[in-house]
Amino acid sequence: MSAVALTPAQHAHAVLVLGLPLIGSHLAQFAVGVTDSIMLGWYAVEDLAAATLGGSFFFVFLIFGSGFAWAVMPVVAAAAASGETREVRRVTRMALWLSMLFACAAMPFFLFSDSILRAIGQTDDLSDRAASYLRIFGWSLFPALVVMVLKSYLAALGRTQVVLWVTVGAAVLNGVLNWVLIFGNLGAPELGIRGAAIASVCLHVFSMVALTAYAATVTREHQLFVRLWRPDWPAFRRIFTLGWPIGVTALAEVGLFAASAVLIGWIGTIELAAHGIALQLASATFMIHMGLSNAATIRAGQAFGREDRPALRVGAAVAVALSALWVAVTVVLFLTVPEALIGLFLDPADPNRAAVIAAGVTLVALAALFQTADAAQVMALGLLRGVQDTKRPMVYAAVSYWAVGMPCSYALGFPLGFGAPGVWMGLVVGLTVAAVLLMHRFWTGVGRAPI
């Protein structure tokens, strides 16, 4: 059954209406991490290092557990488009169940993180500091995963404005609480890294309460929280089957970037600093592609639910074209003013400033190539999730990142002697292979199969 055919311009408008608030939400979430880093850096370098280590540890669990939340987006979009209100309620509830079960399973890793960090070679002091952070911060996994589920649910219903404003509010709250609790302002105790952890828990609880209240009052027709304790095993299995491959796919990509930092750390401190700055720049611009990918998932899910093949293909082409336009802007920016962009992250009086900029210029140029491939693969993943295809993309991503990308990064960086630029060239190769395989999967496979 087909809806009235939309023009490409109408598809573009629909994608932007959904995508712009989601882009803002991703940028606000990105700002939370930047704020934490800046304030802890002002407080103590040792606490910044420990929070960076602890944050990476936490992020591994968050990104994997979020797979169940991301599975909600295409299923709810399809169900809402086909008028299946009961299905919206069933899958969202069971995603909440799966998220909470995952958080319960993850908590021991945070509570005993000092032993784990020592076992992987971290120093005693760094392990103790990071563990003091994680024993508090780890509890935020519960509200954070609830927030992820509710954001996916609301975004799939087209209610992206509330997602934006709640995330912005949480980012502001996090900045204020960091200032108060890390430094001991306004009469509060000076808690340092533990203050940052408490602030993070508070921002996730705030977001959870705000989105829960909104869902309970504004979308009350779905009755999400009525008899929430009752299991629904078919819906549970459906979200689990869709969600765990999404989590593994995201984890494979996150692991690739974490491993690249380790490789560049072997090269030198200057190169690692340049790598961090280039990655921050690429991550900031990537948030636009992430928001567009989320919008593409929702639009593809709606077309999938209506069994509207033409809308699926035209809408997908328009979403990819919008992402490509942003790639063009980014490439121009990265190739024309790299020194200015890198300089934003460096103290003018830092004696290493010139060396970091010199190393970073090449990496930022490679980030332009990197951005092209990364945008294509995340758009393809979004479209494939929209048609509820997650297992084959997981295999493609794992092979591309770890069987191709990481070996290329090592070979180009060390045996072939290209150093940090070689590591980045390997990332480009891995992401390009993923983009080609995933786009091929959608356009010649799933995108052509009968709905």
Image (tube, rainbow, N blue to C red):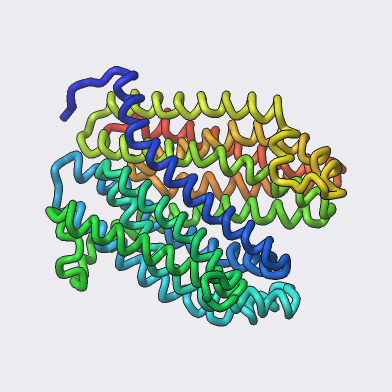
Identify the residue shown where x is 60% and y is 70%.
183
Q: Is 194 located above or below residue 432 in the figure? A: below
Instruction: Tell me where residue 441 sits by quadrant.
Output: top left
Question: Looking at the image, how many numbered discs can be counted on the residues?
Answer: 0
**Residue nearest the observer in this picture, 93 or 364:** 364
Q: Residue furthest front?
A: 186
Q: Provide residue 278's location: percent of width, then percent of height.
A: 69, 42
Along the line of sight, the residue nearer the viewer: 281 or 406: 281
User: What residue is shown at x 25% (from left), y 21% (from top)?
Assistant: 6
Q: Is residue 199 left or right of residue 306?
A: right
Apparent side of residue 412 relative to residue 214 in the rendered image (left or right) = right
> Image point 28% across, 32% down: which residue?
450
Locate the C terminus and report the quarter of the image it occupies.
top left
User: Which residue appears at 24% of the width and 56% of the height?
Assistant: 214
Location of the N terminus (image quadrant):
top left
Q: Please, is residue 178 above or below residue 440 in the view?
A: below
Q: Nearer the viewer, residue 118 or 401?
A: 118
The answer to whether residue 109 of the structure is visible from this angle is no
Residue 406 visible (yes or no): yes
Residue 254: percent from left, percent from top = 58, 53
> In screen coordinates, is 297 left or right of 260?
left
Residue toward you, 184 or 89: 184
Where is residue 56? Give x, y as percent: 60, 62
| Residue 387 image point, x, y percent | 33, 40
